């Protein structure tokens, strides 16, 4: 029996209670109005922690069962409860998220271990829990404004898969981190806007479907970049299942991606990989945040 609270911070916050790795009620959302996309970007870190504490306080008091753990998922490099880097929530960089939140909660009389995880890792944990494969290696690509790579079970490391180098072309310099030839510099939303100054990414994919040469070439490159990164992880950690999700996962054409990976992975013992697209939802990450926290507690 486990009782946890899972929280996911992306361009909004969702928080919900979990019992035995299952949500018990509809999660809370901040801002309540989904039409405020940049609400978090302008928020000072102390206010953000205060909002998290308020949500946890509400959820903790709404249900009398004692909590075992609280898990917070956030984009960026998260190690030992510290946000070492978070390119899309820059104000969080350097923040001792787990410690700060623990302190704020203690002031409200809530003494429960807090665990912080990378958001893509949390999605991988959530997918593994939902599919009953918590004992197996699960890898997830999240395709949104940035490109995230998550894996379950958690292992020590950085795992910034979105910044893996997929091309040696010195002109490939659109990655938000400034690195040359990165996956996110091809696939990221912001990177695509920089490449196609005259077209929105949605138009690029629509035009490609209608046969526009320049857009088709780019959509090919976009798929080959994702294939290259996936093939690299197959060559490092072995085949197995890869999931694809995120706001822009609708642009992934699985047959194209599969053909591209097959062209890159030729050793027969590595060819048993499988690919699956999952519709994006906050609940998977929320669930994963809670599962990661409970597992971290169990050591
Ligand atoms: Zn990069």
Image (cartoon, rainbow, N blue to C red):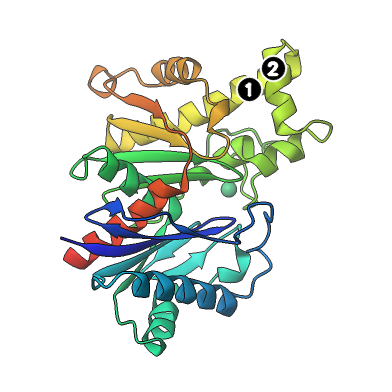
Q: Position of residue 79 (x, y in %)?
A: 39, 65
Q: Position of residue 51 (x, y in %)?
A: 53, 73
Q: Nearer the viewer, mark 1 or mark 2?
A: 2
The N terminus - image quarter? bottom left
Q: Position of residue 5 (x, y in %)?
A: 34, 64
Q: Nearer the viewer, residue 144 or 48?
A: 48
Contact? badges 1 and 2 (CB < 8 Å): yes
Query: To which quarter of the image does residue 212 belong?
Result: top right
Looking at the image, residue 98 lies above or below residue 123 = below
User: Quick check: is the Cβ at mark 2 less than 8 Å away from ligand 1?
Assistant: no
Inter-mark Cα distance, 1 to 2: 7 Å
Query: To which quarter of the image does residue 134 belong?
Result: top left
Q: Which residue in the structure is indicated by mark 2?
A: 208
Q: Residue furthest bottom?
A: 107
Identified at 71% across, 32% down, the residue is 201
Looking at the image, residue 247 lies above or below residue 92 = above
Graded by Cα atoms within 10 Å as few (under 14), some (14 to 19) or many (20 or more), the crowding at tag 1 reads many
- The mark tally for this picture is 2
Q: Nearer the viewer, residue 32 or 135?
A: 32
Looking at the image, residue 197 lies above or below residue 72 = above
Q: Which residue in the structure is indicated by mark 1?
A: 219
Q: Residue furthest right?
A: 198
């Amino acid at each position: 029996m486990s009782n946890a609270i899972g929280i996911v911070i992306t361009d909004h916050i969702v928080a919900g209670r979990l019992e035995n790795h299952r949500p018990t009620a509809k999660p809370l959302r901040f801002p309540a109005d989904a039409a405020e996309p940049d609400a978090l970007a302008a928020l000072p870190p102390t206010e953000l922690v205060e909002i998290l504490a308020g949500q946890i306080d509400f959820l903790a008091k709404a249900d009398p069962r004692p909590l075992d753990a609280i898990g917070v998922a956030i984009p960026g490099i998260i190690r030992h409860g510290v946000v070492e880097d978070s390119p899309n929530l820059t104000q969080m960089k350097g923040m001792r998220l787990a410690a700060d939140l623990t302190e704020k909660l203690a002031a409200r009389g809530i003494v429960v271990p807090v665990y912080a995880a990378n958001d893509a890792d949390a999605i991988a944990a959530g997918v593994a829990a939902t599919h009953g494969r918590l004992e197996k290696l699960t890898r997830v690509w999240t395709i949104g404004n940035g490109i995230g790579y998550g894996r379950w079970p958690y292992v020590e490391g950085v795992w910034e898969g979105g910044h893996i180098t997929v091309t040696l072309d010195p002109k490939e310099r659109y990655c938000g981190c400034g690195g040359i030839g990165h996956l996110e510099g091809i696939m990221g939303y912001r990177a695509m806007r920089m490449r196609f100054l005259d077209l929105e990414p949605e138009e690029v994919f629509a035009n490609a479907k209608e046969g526009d040469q320049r857009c088709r070439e780019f959509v090919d490159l976009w798929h080959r970049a994702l294939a290259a990164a996936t093939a690299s992880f197959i060559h490092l950690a072995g085949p197995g299942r890869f999931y694809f999700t995120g706001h822009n996962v609708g642009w992934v054409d699985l047959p194209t991606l599969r053909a591209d990976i097959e062209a890159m992975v030729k050793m027969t013992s590595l060819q048993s990989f499988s690919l699956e697209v999952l519709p994006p939802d906050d609940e998977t990450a929320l669930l994963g945040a809670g599962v990661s926290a409970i597992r971290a507690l169990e050591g």
